[in-house]
Amino acid sequence: MPSSAIATVARKELTDGLRNRWVWIVSMLLATSVLVIAFFGTATVGVQGVRGGGALIASLMNLAVYLVPLLALIMGCGAIIDEKQRGVLDLILVYPISTGEYFAGTFLGFALALAVAIVSGFGVAGVVLTLWSGVEVGAYVLLCGLALVLGVVFLGLSFLLSLLSRDRTRAVVASLFVWIGSVFVFDLVLVGVLIATGGELPSGLFRALLLLNPTDVFRILCFKWIGSSASSLGLSTLTEFVPSTALLAGVLVAWVVVPLCLSYALFQRRVANDTLT
Amino acid sequence: MGIRLDQVSKRFGAIEAVRPLDLEIRRDEWMGLFGHNGSGKTTLIRMLVGLSQPSSGQLLLDGDPMDREAWRELRRTLGFMPERIEFHGDLSGEETLRYFAGLRGVDTKTVGPLLERVGLGAAARRKVREYSKGMRQRLNLAQALLGSPEVLVLDEPIEGLDPRGVRDFFALLREGGPRTVVISSHRLSEVCRQVDRICILVDGAVRALGTLPELYEDLDLPVKVHIYGTGAMNGTFHAALAALGAAAVARRGEALVAEVSQVKKTAFLLGLRDCGETIQHLHVEEPTLEGAYFDAE
């Protein structure tokens, strides 16, 4: 039964992921960072104590932008290629399981492990914040959900990088480049382009460029759905450029689907040609 | 299940790893596959289990071409023991086997007894990273035996096993009734007597194929007869041995060693009674498969 094979692989990958100490280190870092931001985020402007409301959500969104992609890339960068290098993949492919079932099970397992890590990180901090601060629970949960989707996007990208790399080391390096590019460099380049063109960039083009970066799509969706904090997010000035929520959600879904489809096509081709490293 | 390779070849760019060859592995037959590194052994094994597609030719299962459905059918009843595998160190032996049982659709209740059978019962809950090389090899065998497959393909299965481990390994393989088995190994002397037929691959081509006696006969490797006598065993005796069919005679310590072809062996030994020397002791050194193997190069 196909579903049974997918579940078997997913269960094993979930177990493996949850035994990866790096996953828990980043998860703990996430929880600690949320609490530090909540309790000491305003210390620099002379305000002490717990912070709630939109400003906190805005800070947490930025935190998610940095940490969640990193967590997903760390988890997924060795996916499949590790199995191949250890000889396990060859053995599995001799079993009565299709490449599609194996791929789906692996991604599902990784995604579940990522979900557990993100929900744990945000969840632990969320319980503390609910007890000690006036955090908007609805907005916080929504942020967690979007962060999870962002994580799945980068997990898909990590699968693609893993399959494009010849070994784990190369996959890790490529993942770091993607993380730096997406989280830091892309926006700087975009600002640079705006400055270079004297702000004369057509809004359609600017919008399209924003959609090329999943972290920007995530930021804008947060802005749309947690709109009260727009000014804190520094995005209110972008209103005229911001596409519709449906389009943004669709783009984010596409950021999940497209890398995954490419990864699967690559995986299937390399298995068929026996060229998977 | 019987598997036939019909003019199967495999090419990697300019390199022809396996030249077009015909090979039949009969139902319930044990086939030994031997060859040096680079002989095409592993490529052939990979094609046999469907991990690599032939560049030309085709595989037939019970006489029918292997289409997608036939592969699916074979995989349900195929056990594969790869040469190099590193199981997940964080999983226990039991967890590892449960995982593979799930993939094969085998009842996980069979995992415990199977681990006992391969001698890992006491270590079932220990993490695989704590296993010795021999224990990992047993675990590898256990996963191949899951669900009692009808066809077993074993790539260098006794690598890392001590003599007792090798004996236990073959005893385990014999359990569970007849099945088709393909074993590749470098340890010829330990494997050749366990299999029904032997296939020697050299440079991607079948150099020799047959039963052990057939192989000896085909390759005509000489028997070495060590003769210990009381007399001088001088030139006259040498001439007598040559007359009896010895191809070469040499002194080794106190013995004379005569090389005799397989076909002349019996007549030679019988003839020694009347050769004029008092023979105290005879030691017949049969050719080993290693001899045939290296001779085939």
Image: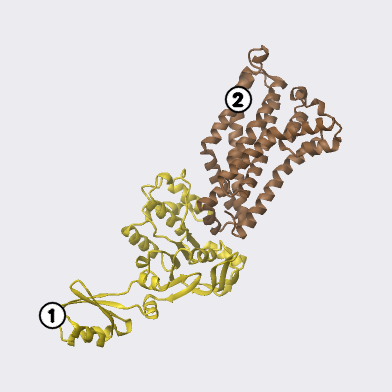
Chain colours: A brown, B yellow
Residue B98 screen position, x and y as percent: 48, 50
What residue is disc 1 on? Answer: B231
Q: How many marks?
A: 2
Q: Distance between the residues labelled 1 and 2?
A: 96 Å
Residue A29 screen position, x and y as percent: 57, 28
> In this orientation, does residue B230 appear?
yes
Type of residue at label 2?
Answer: Ser
Residue A33's disc number: 2
Quarter of the figure that contains the N terminus of chain A: bottom right
Residue A106's disc number: none
Judge whether B225 appears above or below B144 on screen: below
Which corner quadrant of the image does residue B186 belong to? bottom left
Disc 2 secondary structure class: helix
Which residue is painted at 77% across and 33% down in the image? Answer: A190
Q: Nearer the viewer, mark 1 or mark 2?
A: 1
- Is residue A60 left or right of B210 when viewed as pictured? right
